[in-house]
Amino acid sequence: MDTTAVKNKFEFNNNVLSFFNKSFYYLESFSTLKIDTLNKYDAIILDARDVEFARIILKKFRSHSNLDFYLKPIFLINTKPNNDPLLKELVDGNIVSFDQIPETINDINQISIKTAQLESSNSNSFEIQLFKKVLNFMFTRETNTFTPHPDINSSIGYCYPTISVNFETFEEAKVLELLEWAEKENLIWPDFLDRVYLCSNCKNGHLSYREICPNCDSANMRSEDLVHHFPCGYIGAISDFKNNVDTVLNCPKCSKNLRHIGVDYDKPSIINHCQNCNEVFQDYLVKAKCAHCKTDTDVQFLVSKNINVYKLTKKGRTAAVGGISAADFALSDEIFGTVNLKTFATMMHYEQERIKSNAALSANIVIFYIENIFDLYRKIGKSKERELLAEFVNIVRDGITPADFICINNPSVLSVCMNDVALNDAQLMVMKITDKLEELVYNNFEGFALNVVTQTVELSKEQSFDKQLHTLIKEIVEKG
Amino acid sequence: MIDAFDEFLNYITTVGPLKLLRIFWFFVYFEFARFFVFELAVVVVWKLREPARKILYSNARRRLFIERPLVSIIVPGKNEGLHIYKLANSLKEQTYSNFEFIVIDDGSDDDTERICKSLQKNGLIDLFLRNDVRGGKASAANLGYRFSKGKIIVHLDADCSYDNDAIEKIIIPFYLDDNVGAVGGNILVRNYRENLCTTLQAIEYSDTISVGRITSSALGIYRVVSGAFGAFTREALDRVGGWDIGPGLDGDITVKLRKLKYRIVFEPEAICQTSVPNSFKKLIKQRLRWDKSIIRFRVRKHRDVFYPNETFSFSNFISSAENITYNLLLNIKWWIYLFDMAINYTSLLKFIFPFNILLYTANNFLKFIIFSLFRNRKNAPVIYFIPYLPCMVIYFGFYLRFVRTVAYIQEFFFKRSYKDAWNPQKSSAHAKELGI
């Protein structure tokens, strides 16, 4: 990049450009990459001569969980023609030289104003956390449509850039799950575009469709016309009628030559011969082999998914600014051995009354905050959420006494009431439970390091339980 | 009337037996002698040989179950989907289980394809073959035979049902005699209670067809292996190239096999039940088709069985001659008899006809009751059919004779079988051209 001209107009130092109180970071290679420091710049000028490089950087920004990163204005420079949907949808513009930087100022200001309007809200589920982030991006970029793009890199053949950027390309099916959730929450409205068929095992759309023998599943087969010779009624594969001398077809039954299709013979159907097991059949099976997990599935068992163009509903547009108020999670109802928050609060009130009546009695509140649970869900898929939480609850249950009770506040927070145990003992028990939780995830999800933060306090007889719980959760989240 | 009858009785007692024979010659020479006395003699001998046959049969059964050859059951048909499920289920009950079940859909335009594909998917059919364009029953049967793998091919009709040992029974005769090329099964009428038409056919099947086939088989002149239930060795079918185009392909293939000196036998214990036409109008259509085949195949296509050439066989000669004589010629003679009586005994016609009917009815009762003693398997107790037996004179003596006469005229003079919609015109036209 020739920076001579640039220096005349802009201050350019160590890839940082300043113009009208705006600072830009010019990112041209991995060697200039200082991702942790980039949130202090107003915008990024990303050199797109190397499309793959640009793609990786863009993905790093847009998939970041920090709002300062994922909403960062990014402009491409030196863009070459390409069909990458991420490079088209997730940048704020293309410039051909630094001379065009002044033209970006207005966009940067707009994004900044819009970003300032965003209200922070506590997210209580993976879907809400992620979708809120996507909505924030759409709000600041003034778009309200999720348009699917055919994408060779996507595991389902399509990608929704604003959402897909948060997932690996092989887990694109999770994008569809998220969209289905949002549709169910009336945040978006679908308009059918296409349909894809996915592997029933891994939800991958890179399938190899094969016609196979119904007996041995081999694709090694030969198809032939059936020939019906009218005068004698013989019917068989066309090879029955061929000879080694000439191309004339002779009937093997009456030895007559076949002359005129429709007059003395016809071809009423076809027959397939399996070259592997010698089976003869007319209807072959169609199976789809997944390029990802190698599962061979009968096509009728493939997972069919609609690819829709989604538009934000009124609720969705409101949620983009104010946050998502999703339908209540009924995890406590679904996971055995837990109570919901309302019941938990009621029981804690009784508990307070109980310890008030006898000074010898005590109770502790324990909060388990699983800080990076949503990273884990992103990795394993939302569908596993309930199974995983059930496992967590089982571990907690094994580590406490039968009289204690557990509440799932949200997928990242569990509250436990531990009765008549000294605080020290309770803390010890909690430590053991935490180790088990982390061990479970580490062993089952490719060494994923679960970050569990805990807080164990004695239940106050005086302060209202709701207030105690609220303070505890606030502290623990901030601590995390 | 009583006076007149007295007068007739007086007349016949006066004229003596020779004169009576002159008046009732048709009944005495043909109906009574051939279809009662002769058949009775044969079935009595057949019955007397039963103990010896049972030993041979038991040995043959043992040989069958030691070898356990693959049997290919082929069922060609058009729009038979609804029957196939029942048939598939009944085959599951068979005592002989080493078979492949092949269904050939000859261009059905209903749900047959969907039903059969579903059955194939669920393992009730081993091979389902379909011709999108209808080719006729022969081509459908040939298609099934072409892609079958069994040593023995059993041809069934989709709308029939079978005793659970029917497959075993029909293939045992192949182990009684290595020269057996085909075996015909015994067909009973399933819907015999439906109406008069079906009841009369049930009597006909059990009497004429069943006992008639026991007789012809015992004499070595059995001539029609029914398409509803017939078994063939692959070797025999290979030699004749499968079925030729019909109608009448069952009789045709039997003659072709006979010409190759194969033994063709009837197995009365291999039971198949079928639904016969339930109206006289439908029955006419069926019988016209059947009866035309005598002219088409016996008189025309296979007339060479009467020629003294190198393939000549006395049993084939008798088989065809007997068939032509007792169906075609007897039918003509019956009309001659009518004219003979009308011309020579005009004044006695009023006595001759009632007496003839009396004779025939008495004969029918006698035959049905006596022959029922030789039938191991019956549709219903003999008593059920007794009230209907008087109707057989009209049914057999007039109705069927009339239909047969029409069929012979149509085929002999107009070759109407080639225009029968039962077979597609594209192949019938060629058959007519080739005279087959």
Image: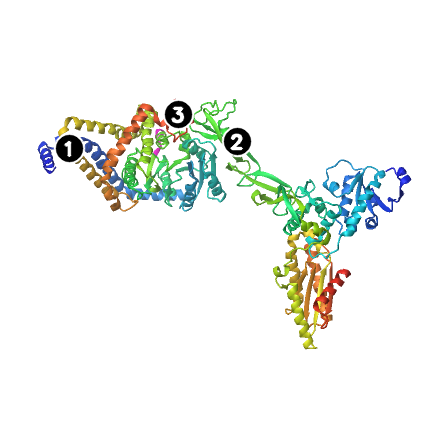
Residue at numbered disc 1: B350
Determine contact: label 1, label 3, CB under 8 Å.
no
User: Pointer 3 indicates a residue of which chain?
Assistant: B
Determine contact: label 3, label 2, CB under 8 Å.
no
Q: In this view, does A42 lie above or below A393?
A: above
* Magenta stretch holds residue A402: no
Q: In this view, does A8 lie to the left or right of B145?
A: right
Mark 1 vs mark 2: same chain?
Answer: no
The x, y position of residue A403, in whole percent, is 64, 70
* Magenta stretch holds residue B259: yes
State whether residue A397 appears in this view.
no
Q: Which amino acid does label 3 sit on?
A: Ala
The residue nearer to you, when weighing A443 against A391, is A391
- Locate the N terminus of chain A by quadrant: top right
Q: Nearer the viewer, mark 1 or mark 3?
A: 1
User: Pointer 1 indicates a residue of which chain?
Assistant: B
The x, y position of residue A309, in whole percent, is 66, 43
